[in-house]
Image: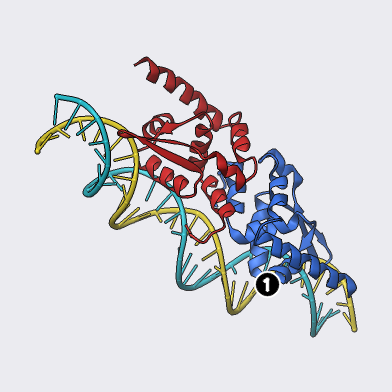
Chain colours: A red, B blue, C yellow, D cyan
Amino acid sequence: MNILAQQESLIFKMLSEEIRLRIAVLLTEGELCVCDIMEVLSLPQSSVSRPMAKLKSSQLVIDRRDGRWVHYRLNESINDIIPSLSEILVQFRTRQPYQADNKRLTEYLLTKNCQ
Amino acid sequence: MNILAQQESLIFKMLSEEIRLRIAVLLTEGELCVCDIMEVLSLPQSSVSRPMAKLKSSQLVIDRRDGRWVHYRLNESINDIIPSLSEILVQFRTRQPYQADNKRLTEYLLTKNCQ
DNA sequence: TTCATATATCCGAATATATGAATATAACTA
DNA sequence: TAGTTATATTCATATATTCGGATATATGAA
């Protein structure tokens, strides 16, 4: 990742990778931690943690540590770089594979709350 | 470029490369041929022709042959894939480096018309 | 402390991408 | 036809990216 890249290109690059895009769409539902995403997308830990580090470095997401957990959320001010980006991501929720992802997220959050 | 990629990811990938993004923003002004873009961006022929082939294969642009020239334009129906993408590209025209590119384009088109 | 858990980072291999130079193709012109 | 111009494609190479597994770090609990 070229540090000198235009901010616009860099955000587009983040969204050009399938897993990162699916994670970004999941985050339109709210804050999630790495283990939530691992579970919902059935991915090994480093395949979630690494993308999150990239998303964070591009400023597309913001992290917040809470004890052992690190919660990630979309950085709403990304809309200053790509106008209405967060609305675009919300629209993707009605398409595959994002729709199925978000459905699994909803189910997962239910069982998680019951514990 | 993975042919199986989601269409959304593929479009974002197209825009994640600086030259392709600058070309896409130029095309918000209207149809351009390869030699116009070469001139305006001061790039060698294959550094314009190759990106155009990729932009075309992703359906972000449409080409039209007119004799020896091939004219490219933005595919407006791309907004079905990425909502309001063409408006986003238009907004980039007020930022650098796109603003300077579009200024050079305007100047270039003036001299071209005078010939 | 020591252990367990959540996350981050590193490593090496595989794959993808971008680039300039050279060559090919397509369409017009003399 | 031969030559010219505009564009496309190929080739070799340099660079970037991704991925799973291994290891490191950070935090809280016993």
* Vertical comparison of B3 with B40: above or below: above
> Farthest top residue?
A114
Looking at the picture, tell me which residue is in the foreground, C24 or B97. Answer: B97
- Which residue is painted at 51% across and 27% down in the image? A102
Specify the amino acid type for callout 1: Ser
Question: What percent of the width, then of the height, locates residue C3?
Answer: 14, 32
Label 1 SS? loop
Looking at the picture, tell me which residue is in the foreground, A16 or A1. Answer: A1
> Tag 1, which chain?
B
- Which residue is painted at 68% across and 53% down in the image? B92
**Looking at the image, can residue B60 be seen?**
no
Q: Quarter-wise, where is residue A91 in the image?
A: top right
Looking at the picture, tell me which residue is in the foreground, A68 or B53. Answer: A68
**Looking at the image, can residue A66 be seen?**
yes
Q: Quarter-wise, where is residue B19 in the image?
A: bottom right
- Which residue is painted at 30% across and 34% down in the image? A68
Q: Which residue is mark 1?
A: B42
Question: What percent of the width, then of the height, locates residue A61?
Answer: 48, 41
Decide: few, some or many residues near mark 1? Use Cα within 10 Å; few <14, some 14-19, many ≥20.
few
Question: Which quadrant: the C terminus of chain B?
Answer: bottom right
Q: Quarter-wise, where is residue C28 in the image?
A: bottom right
Question: What percent of the width, then of the height, locates residue B7?
Answer: 61, 42
* Vertical comparison of A105 with B76: above or below: above
Judge from the rendering whether residue A97 lies leftward or rightward of residue C13; answer left or right: right
Question: What percent of the width, then of the height, locates residue D22?
Answer: 23, 47
Judge from the rendering whether residue A50 lies leftward or rightward of residue B77; answer left or right: left
User: Tag count in the figure?
Assistant: 1
Judge from the rendering whether residue B59 lies leftward or rightward of residue A26; answer left or right: right
* Vertical comparison of A110 with B6: above or below: above
Judge from the rendering whether residue B15 lies leftward or rightward of residue A32; answer left or right: right
* Vertical comparison of D13 with A107: above or below: below
- Which residue is painted at 59% across and 52% down in the image? A8
